[in-house]
Image: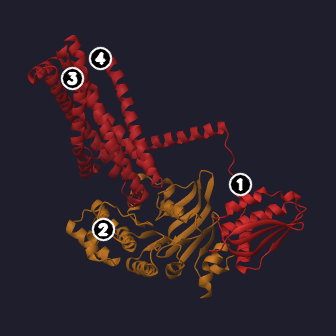
Amino acid sequence: MDNIIEVRGVKTSFEDRIIHDGLTLSVPKGSIYGLLGPSGCGKTTLLREMVMLQKFNGGEIEILGHRLCKIDYQEAMELRREWGVLFQSGALFSSLSLRDNIALPLVEYSDLSTAMINEIVEFKISIVGLKQEDANLYPSQISGGMRKKAALARALAMDPKLLFLDEPTSGLDPISAREFDALILKLRSLLNLTIVMVSHDLQSVYDTLDKVAVIDNKKIIYEGGLKNILSVENQFIQTFFKGMGQK
Amino acid sequence: MYDSSLDIRHIDTRLSLKFRGELTLYNLTKYQKDIDKIDFKNEHSVVLDFSELSFLDTAGSIFIHNIQKKLQSISALHVDLLCDNVEVTDMLELVAAQKIKSKKIAEPEKIGFLENIGRRTFKNYLVFLSFMAFMGELFAHKMHYLISPKNIRFKEIAFEINESAIKAFGIVALTSFLIGLVVAYQSAHQLKIYGANIFIVDMLGISVLRELSPLITAIVIAGRSGSAFTAQIGAMKITQELDAMQTMGFDPYRFLVMPKIAALMITLPILIFISDIMAIMGGMVVANLELNITTNLFLDRFSDVIALKHFFVGIAKGPFFAFLIATIGIYRGMLVRDDTQSIGFNTTKSVVESIFAVIICDAVFSIAFTNLGI
């Protein structure tokens, strides 16, 4: 199986407003895949559909060999353990400390000893570049950049094969954003991850992505590498990528 | 600060509007009134004179743009612009360019009376459907619970019992004591008139055990825990914590919903029991002070006339009230949309609806028990 995610002809509408009108794309194993497009085009919606937070009206999404249309409760629960999701705002559980946030999936899903779990948590904390003494802080006590890193550590807790990132660099200052890009690249090669992300950050798009899909006007208007993207006649692509093409 | 003014005067056959100083959003209303008084139909030629205008802001230039448009719509009128300030002309051009670009959005069509009723009915129908879906999911999860007890989250249930019941002991006890006191005090005067002092025990015993205690307890808990459930789950929804739980495979029903419902169903009967004790104690104090019925006499009479069934009827209502309060509170929490205002809205709704549901449920019980002869 070369493609970890297959999206075929997905249609979405909210009441009478059509968001997606037949999207088709595929995410190859081991790649960093970007969903791009003007704001309001339904990138985040598609991501939410992939992680089963939202239902779609037609078509089919297949993730790691599971077809989301007719997935049953047990299968869905298993699938959810195989991916990690990083939300835009981090979505750390505000009543738990960072350590407990990261440890939670391990405590629930494994029968590891407390000492072992603590060691795993320490490893995840250091791999995302947080300090060990931050582990006892609560989400309200830390900065936005740290929150994203902690949320990433939580998403990686179960060693997923697949990672979803919703605007990972939004709300970060440029230096932290570049650090985060580097972190994502490092993790990909360390842990052999496949990453799907929604991004608005042009620098981060060029630094990290292998393959992109551009959604505009309810359709996919481009799918592929970044090299030839400027050959597409589309207002969004031309304005978004123009600055980079000249460099 | 320049002296700003608008001079309107006729020079030969031409009408001259001379703007001086600044034209900004602070003074254009005054100018508008002056200009509205002019009847342009009698004029042949108009000059807009900006030669002494030193500053024009965007509001001012929209105002000028509108005047120009209005003048141009009158056919036999010649309009001239007098302006040598580059900044002013630039500003006017900027507004004109934007005006051309932005099309007027078509106003939404007016909704007729019948259509309005139809839309609202359909909306309520959808809310009803989603509540049914919620209940369905709830029962499916209840089944999971019953099939394998290892799914039960004892730790969360214990936490919720502490939060929503143990910490509520004080307020429930105090409220019930006062209610017992007040009811006894009001009836003491009436009973004295007939010399039926001792019947205060019958009256208090039955009304408190059967009706007052369960209702008072349920209302206090609806205000206390029902609102807390809505606010907590609503806030978790806004911060995407619920989404995060779902994607991690933690079923919110198992982790948040079922423990809350179970905890409240276990503890509400206990709270009702405490409320019984305190309300009767309140009545006893009044009986002692107002009607000279000693505690011993009160308790003797109590065990003679109050059958045990009255106590059990009151206690048995507990789990049902608890289920209503908890489900409505949680359901309302799940309805919260992505803005903070809807937390307030749904919390209010949750308390009102759960108190209403409790009273309806109580009425149904009353009728049922009476017909069954209990």
Q: Chain of mark 3?
A: B
Residue B56 figure quarter: bottom right
- Mark 2 belongs to which amino acid? Leu
Disc 2 crowd rating (10 Å Cα; few below 14, some 14-19, many 20+) is many
* Residues beneath discs 4 and 1 located on the same chain: yes
Q: Colour of chain B?
A: red
Q: Alpha carbon of mark 4 to alpha carbon of mark 2: how far?
A: 58 Å
Would you name the residue on which mark 2 appears? A98
In this rendered view, identify the residue nearer to me: A73 or A108. A108
Q: Alpha carbon of mark 1 to alpha carbon of mark 2: how far?
A: 50 Å
At x 25%, y 68%, the residue is A117
Would you name the residue on which mark 3 appears? B205
Residue B62 figure quarter: bottom right
Q: Which chain's colour is orange?
A: A
Q: Chain of mark 4?
A: B
Q: Position of residue B172 (x, y in %)?
A: 24, 38
In this rendered view, identify the residue nearer to me: B267 or B290. B290
* Residues beneath discs 4 and 2 located on the same chain: no
Outermost left residue: B296
